[in-house]
Every structure is written in structure tokens, then in C-alpha cells.
Amino acid sequence: MRWPHRRPGVITIAWMAVVLGLLPMPGEYYMLVRIFFCGVCIYFLTKPAGVRDAEKWVLAALAVVYNPLVPIEVGRTVWGIASIATVTYFHILNRRAASAPLW
């Protein structure tokens, strides 16, 4: 069994969240984005195929960075760049996971 080739749901939502986050939004919005990104990191960490072991370390580090319990405070520009880079990374992982066999 193979994963469906196109699962635009999570990655498309992540892209939309980043684009909206580039606009001036209330602080609660950014907290929701952090929760969502942390959840996506955990999702990819638990995938049985398509994510290499070294990438799981990167995902664990991203989950810590985006964790909502102990927020890391940096400038808005830095978060914008980090969010774009993170969603690009999610996109690459999603494409590889879609083409990988389940086990």
C-alpha cells in the first residue's frame, strides 16, 4: 500500500498560515500557528516511512522551537523567514513520504 501521491491538506494549510502570518495579526494567531507547526512536526516524526533518521532529529528540534508551552521570542522577521523555511521543509518531507512505501 502506498500513500496517496497528493495530500494537499496539511501542507496547503501550513502555507496559508504562513502567508496570513506575514500580515499584522494578533498574538493569538501566531500561537495557533505554533501549535499547528508543532503538531505537523510530531506527525512527521511518527510516520513509518519516508522520513530519514537524521530528519527526525531536525523535526524534533523544530517541535521544540515551535512548542507553545515555552515560546521562543525573536523578531517578527526572523519568525517569518523561519516559518517559510519550515513549511518548505514540510513540503519536501511530504513529497518524499507520499512516494515511499508504507513499510
Image (tube, rainbow, N blue to C red):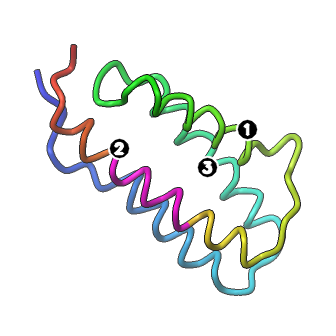
Which residue does the image show at 64% across and 75% down from the upper left?
A: 21
Q: Residue furthest bottom?
A: 24
101 left or right of 64 in image: left
Can you identify the residue that label 2 sits on?
A: 93
Q: Residue furthest left?
A: 1
Q: Amino acid at mark 1?
A: Val
Q: Residue furthest top?
A: 103
Q: Earlier in the sequence, mark 1 or mark 2?
A: 1
Region in magenta = 84-93
Residue 85 marker = none
Q: Nearer the viewer, residue 67 or 52?
A: 52
Q: Nearer the viewer, residue 16 or 75?
A: 75
User: Eyeballing the image, is 43 above or below 20?
Assistant: above
- Secondary element under disc 3, as helix, strand or loop, is helix
User: Eyeballing the image, is 32 above or below 77?
Assistant: above
Assign the C terminus to one quadrant of the image: top left
- Secondary element under disc 2, as helix, strand or loop, is helix
Assign the N terminus to one quadrant of the image: top left
75 left or right of 57 in image: right
Looking at the rendered image, the disc whose residue lies closer to the viewer, 2 or 3, is: 2
Determine crowd level at label 1: few under 14, some 14-19, many 20+ residues with C-alpha closer than 10 A: some
User: Does 90 lie within the magenta span?
Assistant: yes
Q: Earlier in the sequence, mark 1 or mark 3?
A: 3
Q: CA distance from mark 1 to mark 2?
A: 18 Å
Can you identify the residue that label 1 sits on?
A: 64
Can you identify the residue that label 3 sits on?
A: 36
